[in-house]
Structures are given as C-alpha cells and as structure tokens.
Image (spheres, rainbow, N blue to C red):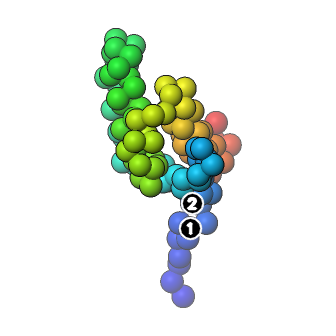
Amino acid sequence: MAKLLDLDAIAPKPKEVTLRGVNYKMSPMTVGLFALAQQFHSEDIENQTPVEQLKAGIEIVRKLLPEMAEAEVENLTPEQIQQIVLFAFHEGEETNEHHAGEDAK
C-alpha cells in the first residue's frame, strides 16, 4: 500500500469577511500571497508614504478577497484594510506553530 500525504488534513479552515451584510470568502494564505506581503514588508515600509503603504495593503486585500468588487475594496477604510490583512495572516501563523511542534518553538 502506498503512503499518502493528506494535505487537506492540514489546510487552514475557510475564513470569511463580512462587509455591509455581504459575506466574502477569503482565499487561503498561499506561498504567493505570503511572498507578496514579505516583499512589501522588506521594501522598508517605514520609509514609504501612507499612500504607498495603503496601495500595498489594497493589492493584498484584492488577492485575499477576489469576489469583492473593485469599488468595495476602494471604499474600505485604512483600518479595515489592516484588519483584513491581519486576519488572513493570523491563522496562518497559528497553523504553522501547531504543525511545527514543540521543537520549532
């Protein structure tokens, strides 16, 4: 019998974001999204203008919430952008810690 690696067993639980009574399914945190976020972060975010920081956050939110209309994304507040990104990344960190075990802590 062949061995099986069940990646579905370690997949993060689906997340949703509610805005104005509409639920939007959030894309799972992928390597691509993580790399994009790290790229923005490594570009010395403290020296970026607030507009540049918001544009980076908006690009990530568009990828996290592909069903959300462009107009809805553009009408989010800076705080909402930040909370969406934090919400997306938070469980990814918890999942990594859980599956890494005590040796990684």
Q: Is residue 23 above or below residue 62?
A: below
Q: Residue at x 45, y 42 (%)?
A: 72
Q: Is residue 105 left or right of residue 29?
A: right
As drawn, the label of residue 46 is none
**Where on the picture, by quarter, is residue 46?**
top left
Cα separation, mark 2 vs mark 1, equals 5 Å
User: Which amino acid, by three-letter code, is at mark 2?
Assistant: Ala
Spot occupied by residue 27 in the image (x, y as percentages of width and height): 48, 54
Residue 97 in sight:
no
Q: Nearer the viewer, residue 1 or 86?
A: 86
Q: Which residue is mark 1?
A: 8
Q: Is residue 56 above or below residue 16?
A: above
Does the CB distance between marks 2 and 1 fall below 8 Å? yes
- Binning the other alpha carbons within 10 Å of mark 1 as few (below 14), some (14 to 19) or many (20 upward) gives few
Where does the N terminus fall, quadrant-wise? Answer: bottom right
Q: Residue at x 53, y 76 (%)?
A: 4
Q: Residue at x 54, y 38 (%)?
A: 84
Q: Is residue 10 left or right of residue 2?
A: right
Spot occupied by residue 60 in the image (x, y as percentages of width and height): 40, 39
Q: Nearer the viewer, residue 88 or 38?
A: 88
Spot occupied by residue 3 in the image (x, y as percentages of width and height): 53, 78
Where does the C terminus fall, quadrant-wise? Answer: top right
User: Which amino acid, by three-letter code, is at mark 1?
Assistant: Asp
Q: Nearer the viewer, residue 102 or 54?
A: 54
Q: Secondary structure at mark 1?
A: helix
Q: Which residue is mark 2?
A: 11
